[in-house]
């Protein structure tokens, strides 16, 4: 009476274990061929896309499953050369300074330096005077283009038709009316340019010139 239930239980366990093994074997032999086939297909696909092709448009086609990605070819390979190109950094210095203060004179940086050379002036002088006199043309009579307080008289301030005219006139005037007459330092220019200044004009112009070094 006692052994029969025990034997029946063992038979059930053995039967369940047998069918469990059968199921696992069936799953293994079903999934394994599928996985091997998928791997083989992937390897074949990769072997067919090893070569990078360049089409007629000059683009490199990078192979990738289902996706076409393009990258531009450089026009030439980078190289290091011992050649040094000479450039006049002064115009760049003036341009950067004018850009920093958002001055309408910025497009005329090259012209400022050209006129300084023409009249043998320090290339920073006219820009520094414009900074002192008008905050680089931000405080000038409307449409006067006079950023230098040039030609101030009892009837008003001299006006110019353009910044080009103003730059040329002021540069030439500094040369002919100041430098050529012996006023060849900022302090000496101040004595004639703004005789009532207590020294602040020369201090400011000198400071602005130093900022452009």
Image (cartoon, rainbow, N blue to C red):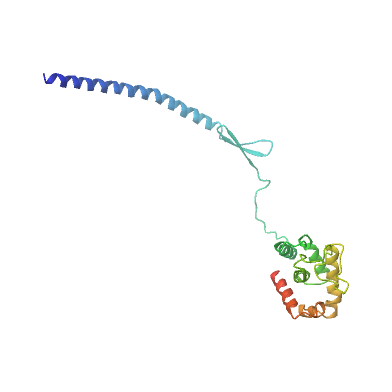
In the image, 58 versus 151, the foreground residue is: 151
Residue 200 x, y percent position in the rendering: 73, 78
Task: Look at the image and tell me whether residue 184 can be seen.
Answer: no
Q: Quadrant of the N terminus?
A: top left
Q: Identify the residue at image location x=65%, y=39%.
A: 59
| Apparent side of residue 77 relative to residue 137 in the rendered image (left or right) | left
| Apparent side of residue 95 relative to residue 53 in the rendered image (left or right) | right
| Apparent side of residue 6 relative to residue 101 in the rendered image (left or right) | left
In the image, 176 versus 160, the foreground residue is: 160
Residue 60 x, y percent position in the rendering: 63, 39
Residue 155 x, y percent position in the rendering: 88, 72
Task: Look at the image and tell me whether residue 69 can be seen.
Answer: yes
Q: Identify the residue at image location x=43%, y=25%.
A: 34
The number of discs equals 0
In the image, 162 versus 112, the foreground residue is: 162
Residue 175 x, y percent position in the rendering: 84, 74
Instruction: Name which quarter of the figure residue 81 lies in.
Output: bottom right
Q: Identify the residue at image location x=74%, y=74%.
A: 205
| Apparent side of residue 114 relative to residue 213 in the rendered image (left or right) | right
């Amino acid at each position: 009476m006692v052994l029969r239930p025990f034997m029946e239980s063992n038979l059930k366990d053995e039967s369940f274990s047998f069918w469990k093994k059968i199921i696992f074997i069936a799953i293994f032999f079903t999934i394994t061929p599928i996985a091997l086939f998928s791997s083989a297909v992937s390897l074949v696909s990769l072997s067919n896309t090893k070569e990078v092709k360049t089409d007629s448009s000059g683009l490199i086609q990078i192979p990738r499953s289902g996706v076409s990605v393009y990258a531009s070819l450089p026009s030439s390979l980078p190289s290091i050369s011992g050649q040094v190109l000479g450039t006049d950094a002064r115009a760049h210095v003036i341009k950067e300074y004018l850009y920093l203060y958002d001055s309408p004179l910025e497009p005329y940086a090259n012209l400022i330096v050209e006129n300084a050379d023409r009249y043998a002036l320090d290339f920073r002088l006219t820009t520094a005077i414009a900074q002192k006199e008008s905050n680089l043309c931000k405080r000038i009579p409307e449409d006067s283009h006079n950023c230098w307080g040039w030609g101030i008289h009892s009837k008003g301030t001299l006006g110019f038709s353009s910044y080009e005219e103003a730059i040329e006139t002021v540069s030439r005037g500094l040369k002919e009316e100041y430098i050529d007459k012996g006023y060849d330092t900022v302090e000496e220019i101040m004595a004639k340019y703004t005789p009532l200044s207590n020294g602040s004009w020369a201090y400011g112009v000198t400071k602005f010139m130093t900022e452009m070094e």
